[in-house]
Image (cartoon, rainbow, N blue to C red):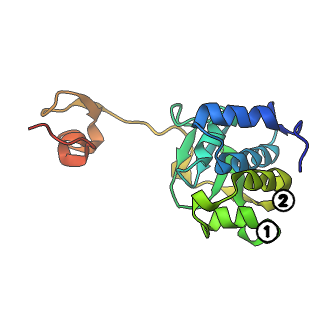
Amino acid sequence: MKNEEEKIGSFCLKEYLQEVEEFHGHIAPGLVVGGFMVEMAKRHIPKGVLFDAISETSQCLPDAIQILTPCTVGNSWLRVIDLGRFALALFDKYTGEGVRVFLDAAKLEPFPAIRSWFFRTRPKAAQDEEKLLDEIKAAGEEILGVERVRIRDELIGKQSKGKIALCPVCGEAYPASQGDMCSGCQGQAPYLSDS
């Protein structure tokens, strides 16, 4: 098993697990793997480069990115493009040059608990959580792959909302690019009507 004093960001492993539990609600295996992924990616970004992030899944990995980098959904430095792949990219926010780190399925054979968790071959309730976390700690970056990437131009830089309009139906402000009324009044709101 890896030394409990191993660093993930500014945290020792034990502190990182506490941070994960506070931020995410429980110690999720995806956030533990995600911690190793973020740190690997950060080492491949030149010092002093301002970077943005992409998470290729909406589950767990965005939280690891938000805990360990200045990239958040709220400041728009983190984009979640849910491709269903357990991968992330950190890239220069001006050039789009960066690195992509992914959980490499080809490297999971020596880690049966991680493999079972990742491929969901055993129900969550039947998994040995302690064994899984021990394997993740022992594996560290051994189960990860890394590659250089260049981000598509339309994903580089801050995405502007453009002009703002008032919706004639609900009276709230919205990006005028949505059309004659806000998306919510066009039927895309997640709420049921009380009427």
Horizontal arrangement in the rendering, residue 162 relative to residue 176 (left or right): right
Q: Total of numbered circles in the picture?
A: 2
Q: Position of residue 91 (x, y in %)?
A: 68, 46
Amino acid, disc 2: Glu
Q: Position of residue 58 (x, y in %)?
A: 52, 50
**Separation of marks 1 and 2 at Cα, in angstroms:** 7 Å
Residue at point 20%, 47% (across, down): 187
Q: In the rendered view, would you say 193 is above or below 107?
A: above
On the question of residue 119 being in view, the answer is: yes
Q: Which mark is residue 107?
A: 1
Contact check, label 1 and label 2, Cβ < 8 Å: yes
Give neighbour class at mark 2: few <14, some 14-19, many 20+ (Cα, 10 Å). few
Amino acid, disc 1: Lys
Residue at point 18%, 41% (across, down): 185
Residue at point 62%, 44% (across, down): 53
On the question of residue 50 being in view, the answer is: no
Pointer 2: what residue?
142
Residue at point 13%, 37% (across, down): 194
